Image: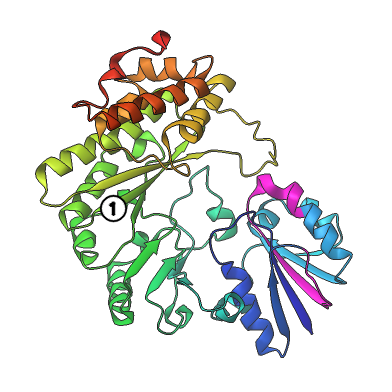
Amino acid sequence: MRVALVDTTKDSKFYPLPLLKISSWRKSLGDTTALFDNVPSGEFDRCYVTTTFTFDIPRAVSLVRAIQRRVPDVVVGGISATLIPEPFEKLGVTVIKGLIPEVEQFSPDYSLVGTPEYSIAHTSRGCIRKCGFCMVKNVEPTFYNRDWSSDIYPGCKKVVFYDNNWLAKDIKDLRKDVMMMKQFGFTSVDFNQSLDARLMNDEKASLLKDVPLRPVRFAFDWMAEDKFFQTAITMMAQYGHRVFVIDVLWNYTDTPEDLYYRIREHFRLMDELNATLHHHVDIKAFPMMYRPIMEIDPFNSYIGEHWTKTTKEGFRTLVNKGCSVTGTLSFSGIKEFEYWFGKDEKEFLQTLNYPNLKKLCELKRSRLRLKRSAGAPDLYDMVYTTTNNY
């Protein structure tokens, strides 16, 4: 059988692990496989299609329709097909919900991506948390440990782990994982779905001391993680880790004021650590806008209960048109943060509601460049001028 594999994730930056494992499975049955990010070119007997975001279902449905005109047997799975299967079922395709048990035992077929830049693996499935904004409890309802050694491409020194909550594992399993990481000789390890700051302690931080985390990822999604966030970063920084990227959920149950606080804590803590440690620490914030996972929202119309259309679009403008690089907030410290976000919550709200925020961001960037080129002693002294003066 000739099998096509299609990833519907738009502009995906990572290898489609489910499809690579399906490829190994189908090849074990004597099939041939080919990977695509659009309608397959060529003749195929079956096509496996993977889906990701529920807000992208209209695009995925359109793509599946086009595939049906080329391939007689279409199978659709993945996150959005599991959560909201009805749009795909109406097309008459086979819909798979959750994981395919027989596929889990297979290693990724890296031949589909040439020589891989990194290996990909799950050392565990599921999560002990049941967060309302997360789909893991629906797609992988059971938390369990798994053997991942065969998922590593021979000789590859970089690995991306897709675990949903690696730190929730028993300490003996964590030690086994770390021992295997050292045996493989990894020079870069990335827990791409973030580590749970609430589960970090000195024993686990010490265990990770010599693991080349590139970067260290945590999340600060709501105020219940306050203090855990700061403690986890401090522990890891004290054990020598330097670069941190923190996922920050917003537009969920948060207010703009507590979003301001959570982001400000990144750079306040960075200043504090750099004043006390013997190595430089860089903490970046990655704001992630909440969109309902059980609704199809292709036009991004959802507004959180404590947000307005103006403040929501204002924050998106501030991040995407103003102070970030590819959506990530990276500041030299608290002064640069306050230059963009304001010295307090009141000024932050003024900024979000500013009538021409895009123009204001352009002006701030221009003034910042001029000050830097002039070698100004305090690059961010204009932070204390209210937005009404621009």
**x 70%, y 56%: residue:** 81
- Residue 306 in view: no
> As rendered, which of 325 and 174 lies closer to the eye?
325
Residue identifier under label 1: 243
Residue 88: percent from the left, percent from the top? 79, 56
Q: Nearer the viewer, residue 302 or 367?
A: 367
* Left or right side of 284 for 119: right
**Residues drawn in magenta:** 39-60
Q: Position of residue 181 (x, y in %)?
A: 32, 75
At mark 1, the secondary structure is: strand
- The vertical placement of 339 against 247, above or below, is above
Q: Which residue is at 32% across, 67% downward?
A: 170
Q: Quick check: can you spot residue 131?
A: yes
Q: Residue at x 40, y 36 (%)?
A: 222
Which residue sits at x=20%, y=47%? 234
For the N terminus, the quadrant is bottom right
Q: Quadrant of residue 104?
A: bottom right
